[in-house]
Amino acid sequence: MIDVHCHFDMAKSPERYISDNEKKQIITIGMTNLPSHFQMGINHVRRYKYIRLALGLHPLRAKEHAKEYSKFRQYVDETSYIGEVGLDFSREGFSTKEIQIKSFELVLDCIRTKNKILSLHSRRAEKETLEMLTEKGVENAIFHWYSGSLNVLRSVANSGFFFSINSAMIQSDNGKKIIAEIPKELILTETDFPYINNNDIENVHIYLSKLWNISIENVEQIIHNNFKNLIERITIK
């Protein structure tokens, strides 16, 4: 099982959470919202085989970004995973739009010559996120919980970027429409823990099994192969 986007640092007991996932051999990529959070957690994660920690600058924490830029640069070579990063032009994030753009540009400039995988927040800014990735020549990214238009989704897919889907998406009509448009070879799974109740990835596997009319085992194999293909992008260079 693969969880490419969660926030285990926000669990009541992060050590227990990742220890349980390690025992179950669940590949788990934990996001951080700020580099200072990555700094606190990275040494706890290094000893695990299936657990990784991503370096993040969450767009909804934009007011705190300026004092974190130096830490982002300091830790960017400590992990292959960058997240949660991106843009949020929803009502919640629109007031910090300019800071977000500056921060995302800094992130992309820092990693554009490095072999990294990004997990992207793009709410109400899907088109702008894609444009910035393209402009900077970034190739390896996952659009986490995509909720934009189908037209932009197709452009994202045509650019070869991945999408991570979760159990909340299979509960909404819009989420189902989006999942149906994503090519099989670009789908990954996530929990977005702790922001989704009943976030079991098995429910996503069951849904995809019915949607694609294949066995759950075949769904799991497709997701595994997709993740393997993404990892190979940053290792075979």
Image (cartoon, helix red, strand yellow):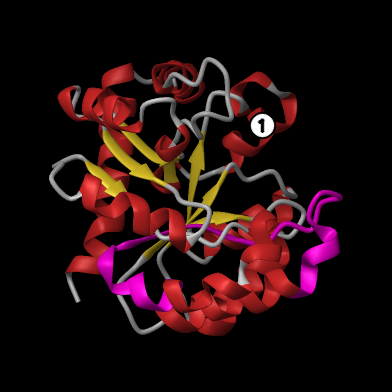
Q: Is residue 37 visible?
A: yes
At 52% from the left and 36% from the top, the residue drawn is: 165
Is 226 inside the magenta-drawn segment? no
At 42% from the left and 39% from the top, the residue drawn is: 9
In the image, is 68 to the left or to the right of 222? Answer: right
Residue 224 is drawn in which quadrant? top left
Instruction: Assign the C terminus to one quadrant of the image.
Output: bottom left
Q: Which of the two residues, 84 or 159, is positioned nearer the viewer here?
A: 84
Picture layout, residue 10 above or below residue 140: above
Q: Which residues are magenta?
A: 72-98
Tell me the amino acid under the disc marked 1: Gly
Residue 50 is drawn in which quadrant? top left
Q: Is residue 189 visible?
A: no
In the image, is 54 to the left or to the right of 154? Answer: left
Residue 128 is drawn in which quadrant? bottom right
Picture layout, residue 165 above or below residue 115: above
The residue wearing badge 1 is: 175
